[in-house]
Each structure stands twice: as C-alpha cells, then as structure tokens.
Image (spheres, helix red, strand yellow):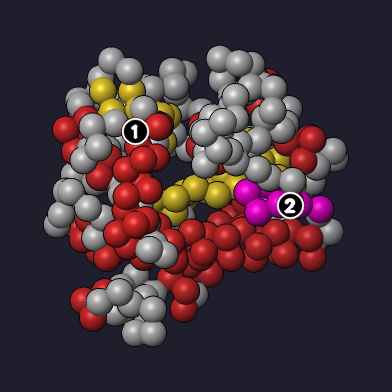
C-alpha cells in the first residue's frame, strides 16, 4: 500500500459517496437538493518522529495535554493529513449573505463533517485490512475538546489538532482567522489518521506558521461577530458566542465560515509560492 493508493481510494470515496450530495430528504431548501459538498481531497504525509509534534506540547503551542502520535499509537510511523475543499456551490452560497450562514454552508459544516468522518473510517479500514494498525484521533474514544467548557483552564483546545497536524505534514500555514491555508485554499475541512504503515514524509514548502497569509485583513472585515483583528488574530470566545447564536437560529445545524469565503485565500494561496 502506497500514497497513491490511499489518495485514489479517498478520491473515489468522496466522488461517489451519496453522503457527498444533499438529498431531498435532508435538504434545508429545494435550492440545495443535489448539491455537492466537497471536491477531491488533497493529502500530505508526515513522520511521527517529526520534532514539531513534540513541540506542540509546549504552552506556547497547544500544551502538555496534546497527545503525541505515539501516545495515540505506540508503534506508529506516519501521520496522514488531508483537506477536503468545499465545492464552489458551498462557497458561492455562503457569499450570498455575509451576516448569517446560508443553507449551503450549514450543510457543508454538518453533513460535510459526517462525510469526513466516514472517509476517515474507510481509510482506516483499508489500512487495518492491509495489516497496519491505525487510529483516527478525532473520533477515537480518547479524544476530547473543551471548547464548550468556559470553566476549564485550557479553553478552546483539544488533545489533537487537525490544523496543526496538517501544518506539520506540509498541507499549509495558518491565517489570521486561525484557519489553515492550503494550495486549495482555506475553505474546507481537515482530517487525519495515525498509522503503523511507513510512508515517506512530504517536504514542508514553508517555514513560518503564517507564511501563506497575506495579512490583507479581508477576513477581519468579513467577520459578522468582529472576532478577528490584524493585531490579535481571532478571539475564540467572541467567535464561539456567535456560533451559539447560529445554533439558536438554525438548530440542529450551526456554522458561519465568513472568514473562509470572499477572501484571497478562499481557494488558493494568496501569495506566490513554489508548490511542487
């Protein structure tokens, strides 16, 4: 089993899964029936021995509660990270109203995450059946996130970070909104798998954690909650309170995504970089 097999397996799953298309039964409105949620995924592969995973335990990064890949799976060798870019229909739909999430984005956030989880399970099954123990941290029973616990000393954090894993594996760098900018942009969802299968690490085409961000401030202007600033970046508390309001308005769905659309990094890297 090699990288290309995993990539092609994922591409086929996303393209042909009925869960990647909005059916009449679940559609919020008739206008989104048949809408495709994600385009083809992009992948990056990193070594579990990359020192950056250890560095994430520092207080200035995530903290001691971050679980190293080998804490998830002691004999692991590779971290597989992938990004599912939202389709143009999802992105275009969310540009229609810059105050509240639209039907397209709400489906992308909720049904999209469900599809992402199923893709992770599918790839884990492929790896396990080939003889390689694997773990999907985000849906493992040991995973926790305390974003919704305001009394916890470590607020808005978890013991595994899809975006930080993606940064280490080489998928992209952070933006002001704390999203990760890939060569397919910032608008989409991330997933990862830790596996005992050895796959060669991809080269990071950057050094600085904000290298791909042009600091243009467009996401600052877009944010309906005024939760982002050029000086301080994203305020998670303000953002979270606004997401709670979207939940009240659109329950059981929620979302926003205005910092990921109608920005230079929506579907690409806004600065010139050599991508190989």
Numbered marks: total: 2
Residue at point 56%, 15% (across, down): 60
In whole angstroms, how far apart are the C-alphas of marks 1 and 2? 29 Å
- Position of residue 257 in the picture relative to residue 180 (left or right): left
Q: Position of residue 77 (x, y in %)?
A: 76, 39
Residue lying at the far front in this picture: please name it: 151
Q: Quadrant of the N terminus?
A: bottom right
- Position of residue 139 in the picture relative to residue 197 (left or right): left
Q: Which residue is mark 1?
A: 238
Visible residue check, residue 177? no
Residue at point 73%, 27% (across, down): 49
Depth check, mark 1 against mark 2: the one in front is 1
Q: Quadrant of residue 199?
A: top right
Visible residue check, residue 70? yes
Residue at point 72%, 31% (across, down): 68
Asked whether residue 160 is drawn in magenta, I would say no
Label 1 crowd bin: few (<14), some (14–19), many (20+), radius 10 Å: few
- The residue nearer to you, when weighing 103 against 147, is 147
Is residue 9 shown above or below 133? below
Residue at point 79%, 35% (across, down): 71
- Mark 2 lies on a secondary structure that is loop
Q: Which residue is mark 2?
A: 141
Q: Which mark is residue 119?
A: none
Label 2 crowd bin: few (<14), some (14–19), many (20+), radius 10 Å: few
Q: Position of residue 194 (x, y in %)?
A: 70, 45
- Magenta stretch, residue numbers: 133-141
Q: Are marks 1 and 2 in contact (CB under 8 Å)?
A: no
């Amino acid at each position: 089993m090699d990288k290309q097999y995993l990539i092609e397996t994922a591409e086929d799953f996303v393209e042909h899964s009925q869960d990647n298309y909005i059916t009449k039964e679940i559609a919020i409105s008739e206008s989104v029936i048949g809408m495709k949620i994600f385009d083809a995924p992009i992948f990056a592969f990193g070594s579990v021995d990359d020192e950056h995973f250890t560095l994430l335990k520092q207080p200035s990064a995530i903290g001691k509660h971050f679980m190293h890949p080998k804490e998830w799976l002691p004999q692991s060798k590779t971290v597989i990270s992938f990004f599912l870019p939202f389709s143009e229909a999802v992105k275009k739909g969310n540009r229609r109203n810059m105050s509240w999430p639209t039907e397209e984005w709400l489906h992308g956030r909720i049904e999209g995450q469900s599809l992402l989880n199923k893709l992770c399970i599918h790839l884990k099954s492929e790896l396990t059946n080939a003889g390689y123990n694997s773990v999907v941290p985000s849906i493992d029973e040991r995973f926790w996130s305390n974003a919704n616990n305001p009394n916890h000393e470590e607020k808005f954090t978890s013991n595994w970070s899809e975006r930080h894993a993606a940064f280490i594996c080489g998928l992209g760098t952070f933006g002001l909104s704390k999203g990760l900018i890939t060569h397919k942009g910032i608008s989409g969802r991330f997933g990862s798998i830790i596996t005992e299968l050895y796959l060669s690490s991809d080269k990071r085409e950057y050094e600085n954690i904000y290298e791909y961000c042009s600091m243009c401030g467009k996401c600052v202007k877009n944010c309906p909650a005024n939760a982002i600033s050029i000086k301080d970046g994203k305020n998670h508390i303000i953002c979270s309170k606004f997401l709670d309001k979207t939940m009240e308005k659109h329950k059981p769905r929620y979302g926003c995504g205005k910092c990921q659309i109608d920005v230079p990094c929506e579907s690409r890297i806004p600065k010139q970089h050599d991508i190989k």
